[in-house]
Image (tube, rainbow, N blue to C red):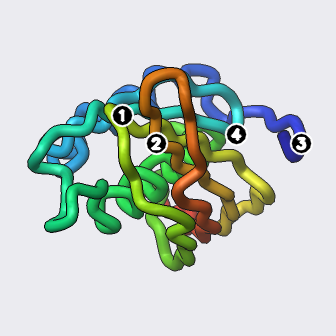
Amino acid sequence: MYESFNPANPDYKSAVHALFHRAGFIQALGIQLKDVGPGWCETTLTLEPRHLQQDGFAHAGLVATMADHTSGAASGSLIAANEMILTVEYKINLLRPGVGESLFSRAEVIRAGKRIIVTESAVFANRGNEQKLIAKGIFTLSVLPK
């Protein structure tokens, strides 16, 4: 954990849950909110054949999307009720093929400014009792009025 944060919205958990329910693309992929706290978020996804690329690995676009949305939710835990988050830039390193039954992502806010939030997100592949880091990214998000 980088530092402790105080959410601007005391009902931030409900706001983050709403982020997931309103995001049609995230719903279609099957990414689920696991847990959220001030400045961090965790998500999961059960891998299905539709998530895989031609060689049987989790598609890079899926991995990047999961890392991005998890970062957005971590950022969203800190903003006021009349604000929203929008990703403006990210860089992701795909470290190894995503092979397993499920994916897990954790994002943490590194720096929370008034208009810009920077996060770090990791994605892991789970196979049996083994968990391997498959991607690591850094995200810059803009805080905007709703």
Q: What is the C-alpha distance between the residues marked 4 and 2?
A: 23 Å
Q: Quadrant of the N terminus?
A: top right
Q: Quadrant of residue 26?
A: top left
Disc with the residue nearer the chain's start (3 vs 2): 3
Name which residue lies at 30% across and 55% down.
58
Q: Are marks 1 and 4 in contact (CB under 8 Å)?
A: no
Q: What is the C-alpha distance between the residues marked 3 and 2?
A: 26 Å
Q: Which residue is mark 2?
A: 125
Element marked by disc 1: strand
Relative horizontal placement of residue 83, taking residue 22 as reference (left or right) = right
Give the residue type at disc 2: Ala
Give the residue type at disc 4: Gly
| Label 3 crowd bin: few (<14), some (14–19), many (20+), radius 10 Å | few
In front: mark 4 or mark 2?
2
Element marked by disc 4: loop
Q: What is the C-alpha distance between the residues marked 1 and 2?
A: 6 Å
In front: mark 3 or mark 2?
2
| Label 4 crowd bin: few (<14), some (14–19), many (20+), radius 10 Å | many
Residue 104 in the image: x percent, y percent?
Answer: 48, 36
Q: Which residue is mark 4?
A: 39
Q: Which residue is mark 1?
A: 102
Give the residue type at disc 3: Glu
In front: mark 1 or mark 4?
1
Q: Which residue is mark 3?
A: 3
